[in-house]
Image (tube, coloured by chain):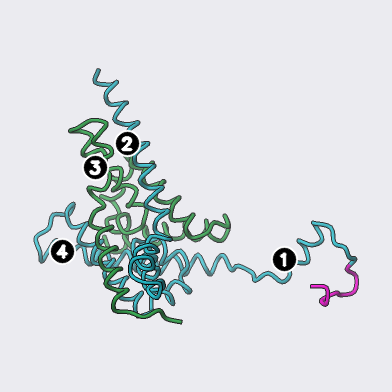
Amino acid sequence: MEYVIAFVVGGLICVVGQLLLDVGKFTPAHVMSTLVVVGVILDFFGVYDPFIDFAGAGATVPIVSFGHSLYHGAMQEASQDGLIGVITGIFEVTSAGISAAIVFGFFASLVFRPKG
Amino acid sequence: MATKTKKGIQFPLSKAEYKEQASKYRPKRNVLQNTFRAFWVGGTICLLGQIITNIYINFFGFSEQDAGNPTVATLILISVILTGLGVYDNIGQYAGAGSAVPVTGFANSIASAAIEHRSEGYVLGVGGNMFKLAGSVIVFGTVAAFVFGALRTILNMLWAG
């Protein structure tokens, strides 16, 4: 069942992105930036964590959860260090995603040639 | 194009007339088909993410919370390899937002920029262009997280004080 929910919820978030592209005439960069900010705002209102409990990877795989993780890291540190923690903690949770993307992306540029 | 003059069109065209004429030649966006493609491809990527998460939970002893990070890293690795092989761009042509919205699209934008600009050298080309597309996501995400994080922290302080 959790696979079905992940599929449907993840698919629906992508549909929102596609509608922003087609109907809203956004560029892909605008769509992704918008969704990240939406993720931050949803987490600000405490909505995103219950959503992850419900949808699993359907909620964590879309880029929206990147915003959620940024906000989460900031608040995690802020609970200990106050306002300074907001700055020091922002990348705490998203480190895996950003580091993996940089490292793998760099090695890919060593190995692969541009296509087409 | 003046050569495409047809009977019944008066030149010069007004703005409204121009729009009417131009819209005939603009490729139609098939919203319904695009939406369906985005749905099933995006859903499949999330399904794959769920499978990877469960593998980490059941075979490597991660808790449900901690399994998120290795899952994202694994998806990114898969996406980078597919980007290098030129497969991910084909998926993107077909699926639109279905492949751009998941975290794999974020990795694809980084890897494809890195590979594409390699000919300009590793420092200026790869290093300088890697975040050309993904940069906006990180910038706006970080700024938003800071603004809302600071707001929440201040609210909490006022609440407690």
Chain letter for green, please: A
Question: N-terminal of the two: label 1 or label 2?
Answer: 1
Q: Secondary structure at mark 3?
A: helix
Number of labels in the image equals 4
> In the rendered structure, which amino acid carries the disc numbered 2?
Gly
Mark closer to the observer (3, 2):
3
Q: Secondary structure at mark 2?
A: helix
- A60 vs A66, nearest the viewer: A66
> In the rendered structure, which amino acid carries the disc numbered 1?
Ser
Q: Are marks 4 and 3 in contact (CB under 8 Å)?
A: no
Numbered label attached to residue B149: 2
Residue at the image position 90 percent from the left and 70 percent from the top: B8
**Residue B64 location, quadrant:** bottom left
Query: On the picture, is B147 further left or further right than B78?
Result: right
> In the rendered structure, which amino acid carries the disc numbered 3?
Gly
**Label 4 belongs to which residue?**
B56
Q: Decide whether the magenta segment is chiefly helix, strand or loop.
A: loop
> In the rendered structure, which amino acid carries the disc numbered 4?
Tyr
Using the numbered discs, state the Cα–Cα distance from disc 1 to disc 4 in whole angstroms: 51 Å
Numbered label attached to residue A89: 3
Percent of width and height locating residue A114: 40, 79
Farthest top residue? B161
Image quarter (top left, top right, bottom left or bottom right) of the N terminus of chain B: bottom right
Question: N-terminal of the two: label 2 or label 4?
Answer: 4
Percent of width and height locating residue B95: 46, 70
Numbered label attached to residue A91: none
Q: Which residues are magenta?
A: B1-9
- Please tell me the colour of chain B: cyan
